[in-house]
Amino acid sequence: MAEVVILVTGMPGSGKDEFIKIAMSEGFADFHMGNVVREYFESTGESLSDSSVGKFASSERQTNGMDVWAQRTSKKLNSGKSFVIEGLRNYEELEFFKRSFPKAVLVGVFASRSDRFSRILRRHRADDATDVQGLIGRDERELSWGIGKLIALSDYVIVNDSDLDGFMTKSRDLIRKIADS
C-alpha cells in the first residue's frame, strides 16, 4: 500500500476507535493524538481526569500554538507508511497535517449525543465523563477548540447510527476507497 494518511475527527464516543480498528486491520498504523496528550500530562504528576487533561491540553495550545498536539504527534510517525491519525480538534492541526502530508484526507465520525454517552459509559476510560453534564461540558470544550469546524470540513463523514457491524462495514468500505484513490 502506498503512503496514505487518514485524519480522523469526531466528538467523544462517536466511534473513532472502532474506525481505527478497521483501518489497522487494513494495514494502517494507528496514532492517537490523545495518547500523546496523556503522555505529556503524566509528567505533571496530577491525577488523571477528563477535566484535568482538558485543561492541560488547552493550556499547552495557548502556550505553544493551536497545532502543538499535531506537531508532537508527527514526531512519532515513520515516513513511508500509511497512517490513521485520530484526535484532531482544530483547524490549525488539520492545516499542519495537510502541509506535512498533502494527500491526507479528513474523515469525520458523527453520532448523536445519546448514542455517544451510552458508548462512553460502556468503555470505562479513566478520563471519560461519568454523567451527561460531564459529557456536555466536554462537548463544549471540544467545540470551543474548533472540532465542529473540522467535522464540517471533513472530506468524508460516517454517521455512526447503526449497530457495530453496520458501522464496521461502512468504515471498511470507506477506508478501502481512500486507500485505492
Image (cartoon, grey):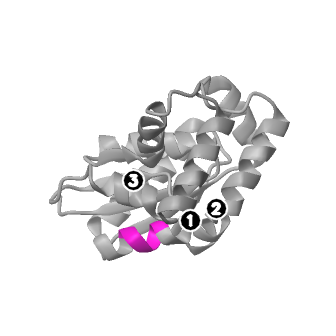
Residue 36: x, y in percent? 41, 43
Which residue is nearer to you in this view: 9 or 71? 71
Q: Amino acid at mark 1?
A: Asn
Which tag, 2 or 1, sits closer to the chain's start?
A: 1
The magenta stretch spans residue 145: no
Q: Is residue 94 magenta?
A: yes
Q: Which mark is residue 85?
A: 3
**Kind of residue at badge 3:** Ile
Q: Which of pointers 3 and 1 lies earlier in the amino acid sequence?
A: 3
Q: Quadrant of the N terminus?
A: bottom left
Q: Nearer the viewer, mark 3 or mark 2?
A: 2
- Which numbered tag is attached to residue 134? none
Which quadrant would the C terminus be assigned to in this image?
Answer: bottom left
- Give the mark nearest the N terminus, 3 or 2: 3
Residue that appears at 52% across and 53% down: 60
Q: Position of residue 176 (x, y in %)?
A: 34, 58
Q: Marks 3 and 2: CB-CB under 8 Å?
A: no
Give the image location of residue 73, x and y in percent: 35, 52
Whether residue 174 can be seen here: no
Kind of element beneath mark 1: loop
Majority SS type along the magenta span: helix
Circle 2 residues within 10 Å: few <14, some 14–19, many ≥20 = some
**Residue ID for mark 2:** 145
Q: Nearer the viewer, residue 36 or 14?
A: 36
Give the amino acid type for the residue marked by disc 2 in the picture: Trp
Return the residue found at the far left: 80
Q: Is 93 left, or right, of 152 in this rendering? A: left
Bounds of the magenta segment: 93-97
Callout 2 secondary element: helix
Q: Which residue is mark 1?
A: 90
